[in-house]
Image: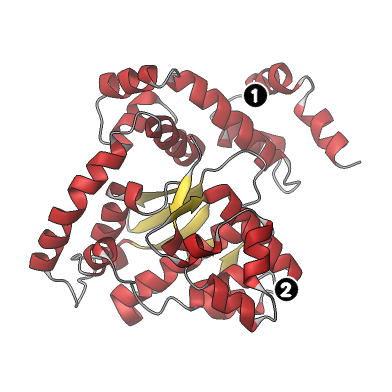
Amino acid sequence: METMLRSIAMSGYFDTARRLGLNPIDLVQRLGIDPAALANPDERVPAAACCRLLELTAEMASCPSFALRMAETRQKFGTGVINVLLAHKRTLRDALLAAAEFRHLLNEALAVYIEDVGETVTIREELVVDPGTPTRQAIELAVGVLARHSSALLGNHWKPRSVHFTHCGPADQTFHRRFFACPLEFGSDFNGFVCAASELDYPNPAADPELVRYAESLAKPLNASNASNADSIALEVRKAIYLLLPLEQGTVEYAARHLRLSVRTLQRRLASADTSFSELVEEVRGELAVRYMSNARYPIGRVAALLGYNQQGSFTNWFNARFGMTPRDWRNRQGK
C-alpha cells in the first residue's frame, strides 16, 4: 500500500516555486502528481512522489533552503478540524501528542516522538517512505513546520536549545540560521529539536477546551476509520521502529506502548497484514544501516549502537549476512 499524505502538508509549494522563477505545474506533472490534487488541501497524494518533487525543485532552483522557504509561509495553523484541534490544545506537548494520535488524518509518512530526559526534551521527527527515496527537503519541511507551529502556539516562549538533522548541511547556512534562530547540528543522530521541558508544558494562551472537544468529536470517527485499515499497521510499526531503535527501545513492548496497543493486539494485527515485528525490525535496521553507513562522520561503532547492537562484532556479523561484506568493506566501496 502506497504511503500517502494530505496535500495540506505541501502548502506553500506553488507560491514558493513561482517566487524562485520556476513553473511548478510542469514540475508537479513531471513527477506524476495531479496538480489539482496537490492544490486541494483535502486531497491525498503519494508521499514518496512529494519527497522527490521537493528535491527536484530545490535542485532546479539552486536553492537548498527551498523546503524551509515553504515552511516560512506557514504563519499559523491552517484551517480544518485537525488544525483547529491542535491550535487550541492546552500546551505544545498536548498538541504534539494529538498530532501523533490523529496521524492518519495528517501525514501517514511522518512520525513524531517526545523523549523526556530530566528537564530536557527531545522532539524527534522521522519520515518513513520507500527505501531510496530522497528525504532531505521533506525532513527540513517537517521540522520547519514544527518550528512555525510551536512558535504560533508559544510565541516568544518557544526557544529551542538546538535543531538537528541527520543529513549534512548546505554550504551556505545563512537562511537556516535565520529561520531557526538557534544552534544547528547537521549529521546528527536524529531530526528534530532539543528544548527545555518547561516549553512543552507552557500554557497556550489561545487554548479553548470546548473547541478542542468539538473538534475531537468530529475527528475521532474519521481517525478510527483510517486507523482500522489492516494495511496501515505495518507502516505504523515501521515508523515506531524508526524512532525507537536508535534509542535502544526497538522492542515489541516499546512499539506497542508507543502505538497505545497491547503486545498481543499488535502481534495479531501484524499477522493479519502477513508480517511480524521481527521482520519489520530487520527491514528498518537494513534501511537505517545504509543511511548511517553512508555518513562518513559516523564511526562504525556508533552505527552499531544506533542499530541496537551493544557489541560491534555482533553488528559486523549481522551486516555481513545482510549485505555480503563487512561494514568497513561496504564503506570503502562507497568511497570509490
The reply, left or right, for residue 226 in relation to residue 303 is left
Residue occupying the point 70% across, 61% down: 56
Dot 2, crowdedness within 10 Å: few (<14), some or many (≥20)? some
As drawn, 230 above or below 129: above
Q: Position of residue 118 (x, y in %)?
A: 32, 53
Mark toward the viewer: 2 or 1: 2
Residue at horizontal 49%, vertical 68%? 144
* Residue 291 lies in quadrant: top right
Which residue lies most toward the right here?
Answer: 336
**Residue 104 at x, y percent in the picture:** 34, 46
* Residue tagged 1: 315
Residue for badge 2: 61
The kind of secondary structure element at disc 2 is loop
Q: In the rendered view, does 91 fall on the left or right side of 278?
A: left
**Image vertical order of residue 170 relative to residue 335, above or below:** below
Q: Residue 62 at x, y = what percent? A: 75, 72
**In the image shown, does 196 or 237 lie closer to the viewer?**
237
Q: Are marks 2 and 1 in contact (CB under 8 Å)?
A: no
Q: Earlier in the sequence, mark 2 or mark 1?
A: 2
Q: Marks 2 and 1, Cα distance to the nearest angstrom?
A: 41 Å
